[in-house]
Amino acid sequence: MTRHARRLRPWHCTGWLLAIACGSDPAGDADSSSTGVSSTTAATTTTAGTTIGSSTADDDAGSSDAETSDGPTTDGDSSTGDPVVPPTCGPLEGIPGEPGPHVAMIEALGADEWLALGPPAADPTFGTARGRSWGGRALVPAPALRGAFFTGEGVHAYVKPDGYGMDDVWFYDIQGHAWIPIYPGTNTADFTQRVIDGELSIDENGQLQDGEGHPVPVHVLIHAWDFLTYDPVSERFAFVAGDGMGRYYMPGLEIIEEGLAMLEQQREGIAIPPMSPWFWSVADCTWERYPIAAAPPDVGGFAAFVYASASDEYVYAGSQGVAMFDRTSNAWTAVADTGPRPPGYDHGVAYDPVRHRLYMGPGSGGPSNQMFVYDIATATWTNPASAGPVPGGLGTNGVSIFYDAANDIVTAFAYHEGAHGMHYTYDPETDTWTSKEMPDGVANAVGYPSHNAFYDEVLNAYFVYVASDSADNGTMFAYRHATP
């Protein structure tokens, strides 16, 4: 995919938030605050550029005085210290770009303040990234790139008005507050013709490939669940998924039927080997997937796939066990884990690189109000008897959970609890949860909302994208828990 001319703009100056930052205050208010309208009580509504404070901040919130970060850098990834060269190919050419004025507003956030950023700028060709259900972790941060990858289908088998399926992959550009399409999705209109022309075919491993021999991720995920992660060392967006040749909830099946049948015929008689996770390489902007010796062990349904920076490997954990994927040997290894595993499926997960731990919920079908902790170094599960109000669950269709590096806490936004959603924090040192209501106008910013979120360690800020499932009505919020 070639880079669009719009991407040459350093930032998107629109809406009330950026109108203030660009030197025009539509409210005509000479407020000295650089973050627009602020409040010391929980607000009931939000508008773009509004900073929403709270008088019910946790005891561990720290000082409310805003401290700015040193700003984004491109000479190293903060989690590894390895040098990072900004991509110069394809859709991410020139990323990270210069920060727009909204970045200063995020830097200026005080403790327990929300900032309504408004809708990210649309791509001129492919529009905006639509909302997606079961996507509490569907936004995957890539700190050195100053943004997050975003994928996972929403409404089953949905085809967007432009004829592309919802198996698309996006990048949210923090600096420009804009959506960048990595893969626009399956073009149902020309799918069959591309098969006829040989631009889509089946390779010797039974995998769908394009005319250059690269794998093509057609309908490989239905929802994001806990399957997505980012590896800053190899600079690859990664996820576990299948081949994508199944018809179950295939977007536009009736439109691509002829081409799909031709591919199925090409695939007949091929012994399909176990395949690696899917990777999208930042270095050369191509998809990667390759045959491996053995499939991953069964670790349970809809398990959590996480890059663990402390050991530089991928962890795959669920109700039936744990496995590791080593990208050097390209092999899965079953782990002899001990302790009480989290029951159910779709657990929700946060990785703590300081303690080298996973924090996971019990999942759907399991008991509520519990958390399970997996110590990667010792391969040990625990189910701590935590003090305080524990979230009802951490599943991805209603909760986003993160490790907050600046404050050394775990945060969970439970969007469907309480009147407006509940904000939980967990202190790993004291095994204690605290909670408070989220402000009105965030979790319920649109009708029939889906919620996708990530934590950015550079800005010490959370980003929450709220959009109706598979709709293009999304809006973005930024939040800071505290400034240490």
Image (cartoon, helix red, strand yellow):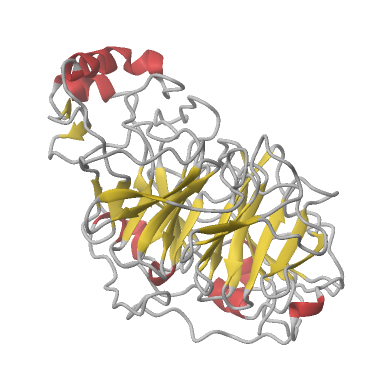
* Residue 18 horizontal/vertical position (percent): 59, 68
Q: Is residue 40 visible?
A: yes
As drawn, is 136 to the left or to the right of 173?
A: right
Asked if residue 128 can be seen in this view, the reply is no
Looking at this view, is 106 or 17 the one in front? 106
Left or right of residue 79, residue 465 in this image: right
Residue 251 picture location, percent across and down:
42, 24
Residue 165 location, quadrant: top left
Residue at point 16%, 21% (across, down): 270
User: Against 338, is 211 above or below?
Assistant: above
Q: In this view, does 342 lie to the left or right of 393?
A: left
Instruction: Say above or below: 333 vs 7.
Output: above
* Quarter containing the C terminus: bottom right
x%, y% of residue 74? 35, 77
Residue 396, picture quadrant: top right
Q: Position of residue 100 (x, y in %)?
A: 49, 72
Identify which residue is drawn at 44% across, 52% down.
Answer: 336
State the image quarter where residue 259 is shown.
top left
Question: In the figure, 113 relative to 313: above or below?
Answer: below
Q: How many labels does the image show?
A: 0
Q: Which residue sits at x=56%, y=65%?
A: 455
Residue at left 28%, top 59%?
282
Nearer to me, 124 or 218: 218
**In the image shown, does 26 or 400 lie closer to the viewer?**
400
